[in-house]
């Protein structure tokens, strides 16, 4: 694990833009979201560079999925801006924003959202077809390669209802990566997987991000995710803080019976 945060900092505010990498693919600037009069978060600043993998942690209900949904354009922030590959998505028209998402974004949803009436292969092929790739052989080749990469070779003809939860999650991951997106957003991508499969899926996500120079933001409670990430951050209702190695160690420290509780324990 390499953490690009000062060793003496337990949790510190996310560094200002000037000290973050210049070539950030994703820039979240002063984002706020509330539901009615109930605030979820505000003052969220985050930058993810091309080829960088960032693990996003935070207590349940703090707004991690909401933040990812805002970045993906599936939810509307109440203040702030989101820039992807230099485009302020709030200022793009509906059509241009949809095109940007279709071409640049791969999203692994917390609840999979695998389409039940399409075969596994057709689910994975969807982003390629939406991008207008018409070469059937190329589509089949890339779908097959992706299914192999997530450990589901030969599953293409199956229907989603014939898959386990963990297998569905891997289909969702294959679908998020097949069009080689510049920005990968993954919302608890290993939540339903056994440790060995989770490790393989994380290797795939991180490997893909690095190979393609994609920016990758992974929401996860898993230690394995923070170990593979370049850095880890913690979402609070009032912004994002950097987590250094010591803070991560405390976060994932095993809770010994009788000992005073530290923070939430790891799930892997
Ligand atoms: N449509 C909605 N209307 C009102 N409140 C909502 C809505 N969607 C989410 N919330 C609330 O917003 C907060 C953030 O939810 P979110 O799903 O983003 O949390 P999370 O950090 O992803 O949690 P978890 O770790 O459990 O997945 C929660 O308190 C949730 O109850
Ligand atoms: Mg969530």
Image (cartoon, grey):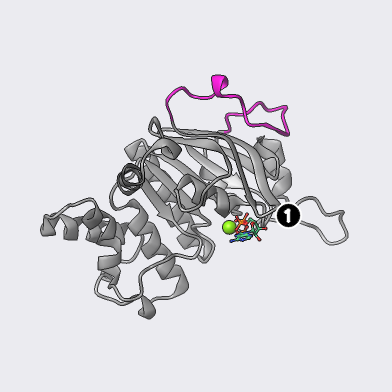
From the top left corner, tell me how far across and down residue 257 is, in percent. 83, 62
Classed neighbour count for the residue bearing mark 1: other residues with Cα under 10 Å, few (<14), some (14–19), many (≥20): some
- Report the predominant secondary structure element of the magenta stretch: loop
Q: Which residues are magenta?
A: 3-24
Which of the 4 image quarters holds residue 91? top left
From the top left corner, tell me how far across and down residue 221 is, in percent. 61, 54
From the top left corner, tell me how far across and down residue 48 is, in percent. 49, 34
Query: Image point 41% across, 69% down: which residue?
Result: 168
Residue 168 falls within the magenta-colored stretch: no
The residue nearer to you, when weighing 29 against 116, is 29
> Which quarter of the rendering shows the C terminus?
bottom right
From the top left corner, tell me how far across and down residue 234 is, in percent. 65, 42
Q: Residue furthest top?
A: 18
Disc 1: which residue = 264
Q: Is residue 33 visible?
A: yes
> Which quarter of the rendering shows the N terminus?
top right
Judge left or right: residue 172 versus residue 81.
Answer: left
Question: Quick one: SS at disc 1?
Answer: loop
């Amino acid at each position: 694990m390499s953490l690009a945060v000062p060793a003496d900092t337990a949790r510190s505010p996310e560094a200002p833009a000037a000290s973050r990498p210049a070539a950030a693919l994703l820039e979240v600037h002063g984002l706020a979201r509330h539901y009615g009069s109930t605030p979820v978060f505000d003052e969220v600043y985050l930058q993810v560079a091309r080829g960088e993998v960032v693990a996003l942690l935070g207590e349940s209900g703090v707004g991690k999925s909401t933040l990812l949904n805002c970045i993906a354009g599936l939810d509307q922030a109440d203040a702030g801006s989101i820039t992807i590959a230099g485009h302020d998505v709030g200022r793009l028209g509906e059509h241009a924003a949809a095109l940007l998402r279709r071409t640049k974004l791969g999203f692994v949803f917390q609840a999979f959202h695998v389409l039940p009436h399409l075969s596994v292969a057709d689910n994975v092929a969807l982003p390629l077809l939406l991008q207008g790739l018409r070469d059937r052989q190329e589509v089949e080749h890339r779908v097959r390669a992706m299914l192999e990469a997530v450990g589901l070779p030969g599953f293409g003809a199956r229907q989603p209802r014939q898959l386990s939860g963990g297998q569905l999650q891997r289909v969702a991951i294959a679908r998020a990566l097949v069009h080689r997106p510049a920005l990968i957003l993954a919302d608890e991508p290993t939540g339903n997987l056994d440790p060995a499969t989770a490790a393989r899926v994380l290797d795939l996500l991180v490997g893909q991000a690095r190979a393609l120079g994609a920016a990758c933001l992974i929401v996860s409670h898993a230690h394995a995710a923070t170990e593979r990430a370049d850095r880890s951050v913690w979402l609070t209702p009032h912004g994002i803080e950097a987590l250094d190695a010591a803070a991560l160690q405390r976060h994932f420290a095993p809770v010994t019976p009788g000992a005073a509780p530290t923070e939430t324990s790891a799930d892997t």
